[in-house]
Amino acid sequence: MIQVGDHLPQATFRVSGPDGPAAKTTDDVFKGRRVVLVGVPGAFTPSCHRNHLPGFVTHRDAILARGVDAIAVTSVNDVFVLDAWAKASGAEGIEFLADGNGDFAKAIGLEMDGTGFGLGIRSKRYAALVEDGVVRVLNVEESPSKAEASGAEALLKVI
């Protein structure tokens, strides 16, 4: 599992762009930037949709005011689902990074086996502060149904 002080591995996400889906690498997202990265098990799932993402939408301005350049949310969902989730959540100004095959979640050692629930391999729930590709803060939830240690309020206390 990735640790504080580690560099994020190279990976490619899919993002929704004006001309449809586009590729965005970890360098594109994190190089030269201070980014809050939020990992969730799935768009529209109850804890993610009702408990986790809303805190980052509500506290977006307070987080950015702490010298953060961007808030990015990643999930093992396709780019179309994440785009719909962003729109349904009123999450303007938050970047959504589709990790459709779970390659990034696996590369950082934060994948979760949700096959018992019909979800396949997903991302664990976490929040991190990444500076120029280096993990500076990493809060991983013990349980995928909780959004406490990885919530916006908890992260605001340490950034």
Image (cartoon, grey):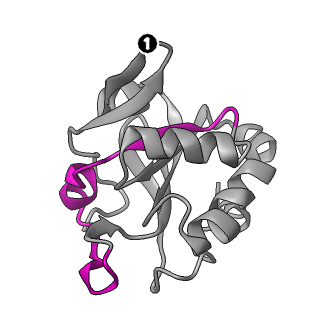
Q: Position of residue 66 (x, y in %)?
A: 72, 42
Q: Quadrant of residue 151?
A: bottom right
Viewer-closest of 20 and 147: 20
Q: In which quadrant of the rendered image does the C terminus lie?
A: bottom right
Q: Is residue 118 above or below residue 105?
A: below
Specify whether residue 154 is in view.
no
Identity, as a three-letter code, of the amino acid under mark 1: Asp
Q: In which quadrant of the rendered image does the N terminus lie?
A: bottom left
Viewer-closest of 29 and 79: 79
Q: Quadrant of residue 130?
A: top left
Q: Position of residue 127 (x, y in %)?
A: 51, 61
Q: Position of residue 110 (x, y in %)?
A: 30, 67
Q: Quadrant of residue 54?
A: bottom right
Specify whether residue 146 is in view.
yes
Which residue does the image show at 70% across and 34% down from the upper left?
Answer: 92
How many marks can you see?
Answer: 1
- The residue pinned by badge 1 equals 19
Which residue does the image show at 69% across and 53% down from the upper left?
Answer: 56
Q: Is residue 21 above or below residue 140?
A: above
Viewer-closest of 69 and 82: 82
Q: Is residue 57 above or below residue 105?
A: above
Which residue does the image show at 77% across and 38% down from the upper left?
Answer: 65
Q: Position of residue 69 (x, y in %)?
A: 61, 31
The stretch drawn in magenta includes residue 97: yes
Q: Say left or right for 36 vs 5.
A: right
Q: Magenta residues, as a range? A: 92-118
Viewer-closest of 54 and 77: 77
The stretch drawn in magenta includes residue 99: yes
Q: Say left or right for 53 vs 34.
A: right
Identify the secondary structure beneath mark 1.
loop
Dot 1 crowding, Cα within 10 Å, few <14, some 14–19, many 20+: few
Which residue does the image show at 49% across and 29% down from the upper left?
Answer: 33
